[in-house]
Image (spheres, grey):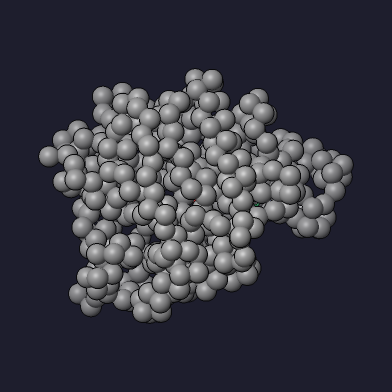
Amino acid sequence: MTNVLIVGSGARETALGLKFLASPQVDQVYVAPGGDGMDIVGLHSVAIDVMDFPALIEFAAANVALTFVGPEQPLVAGITDAFTAAGLPIFGVTKAAARLEGSKTYAKHFMAKHDLPTARAKSVQSLSAALSVLDEWGVPIVIKADGLAGGKGVVVAQDVDTARAAIDRLYAADAAAPVLIEEFLAGQEASVMALFAGQNAVILPLSQDHKRRYDDDRGPNTGGMGAVSPLPQFTQQEQAAATALMRQTVAALVADGVDSCGVIYMGLIFTAAEPKILEYNMRFGDPETQVLLPQIQNDFYALVTDLMAGKQPELQLDGQTYVGVVLTHPDYPVTSKPALPVVQPDTALLAAHAWIPAAVSKTAGGLVSTGGRVLTIVGSGTDAGSATKAAYALVQQYAGQLAYRSDIAHNALVTSKQN
Ligand code: AMP
Ligand code: GLY
């Protein structure tokens, strides 16, 4: 009996669970804390919080051969170090490596030290220092709170008033706040993710999230409204440059002695000259995971455990394009209340792994939403056009009262530079 524990409760964790469950070696997949939606797709929720390390360790020791961590908070707090101290195998970066995501200032030092291309930046810790950088550099300019902010700590200011207001707000909350001020970079954003262990890495195709709440990239930032992968709008040369940056990052972690194993997520911006690194996350992206994992043909349990055993697995992809559309509460990201009905998936949808639940609960009256990002619908096809069509055909059927963006994959649909 080989069982796996996934730590987390989003659609990312559901997608990971389904991928592990598809391995011929895996019997059961548990998700902590999971949710009712996970049980509907064949996973097993376990009511343990992602930060309750002693309870997770006790459960893992008794029930599973491997634990895989989804979200950043437990990684930054040292879940991997705690499992390792208890002698339990876990796939997720150590607390030391998680600082690349947890501290933007540390990430900037890391990139400078290892010649990894990124926006010019200055760390400041006072209102006057922040204002003098603004004076010197002018606008457009980017103001970032240091630390985990769930994507909400960044202000891209096109004018001085917006920049000034962002700086005032940060220093009103904390007079010594660590703030990063960055040069504005123009270009299309995309991400590259890799599973790595030591110097070995399995680098996945480029993917693109859509962070703004509304069509045409308007409205507030969210956790992510939809994703597409791979991305035909980038040339082979651009894709190769992104892969090279990932290899350079893995080598840099080894050189710094903070390698371990886990996931690296590089948020890139493709400027006219070259891709530059906007951010590191040391975990899979959500919703990118929902469109990356289905491309992988390898036995996923073997891929992860081979990496952990010091081997270099060869990635096999299916060559298809996947589009994921996130269904949200209509008031997200402001509020996710009241709960709304969720349309019951049929067996064909479940069998196709096209319905990837996050915040779904079962009640006597049927399924209801329990959060902002409720589920991801995934469609596939031979190219971005057919995958988008397939995804939206399902969205029409299953959205019910939930909201969504109707332009996911719009950049991938414009004529490819290669063609
Ligand atoms: P971050 O959390 O650092 O990735 O920033 C969130 C978002 O802010 C990014 O996805 C970009 O859209 C934008 N952003 C961050 N830094 C820059 C920059 N230097 N230039 C332009 N846009 C940026
Ligand atoms: N989709 C963006 C993230 O997971 O950070």
**Residue farthest to the front, as pictured:** 419
Residue found at the far left of this picture: 1
Q: Residue at x 55, y 71 (%)?
A: 407
Compare residues 333 and 378 and report the one nearer the observer: 378
Which residue occupies the foreground of this view, 325 or 342? Answer: 325
Q: Position of residue 387 (x, y in %)?
A: 44, 67
Residue positioned most to the right: 136
Residue 175 visible here: no
For residue 159, side relative to residue 218 (left or right): right
Q: Quadrant of the C terminus?
A: bottom right
The relative height of residue 311 versus residue 128 in the rendered view (above or below) is above
* Picture coordinates of residue 89, whole percent (x, y): 28, 30
Residue 392 sits in quarter = bottom left
In the picture, residue 411 is in which quadrant?
bottom right
Q: Residue 57 location, x and y as percent?
A: 25, 34
The answer to whether residue 231 shows anywhere in this view is yes
User: Number of numbered discs present?
Assistant: 0
- Would you identify the image quadrant in which residue 300 lies? top left
Please state the horizontal and vertical placement of residue 414, each as a whole percent of the image.
61, 66
Which is nearer the eye, 78 or 140?
140
- Taking the spot 74% from the left edge, 44% from the top edge, the residue there is 273
Which residue is found at the position 42% from the left and 37% from the top? 202
- Quadrant where the N terminus is found in the figure: top left
Residue 90 vs 214, above or below: the answer is above
Question: Is 34 in front, or is 40?
Answer: 40
Identify which residue is drawn at 43% across, 29% down. Answer: 200
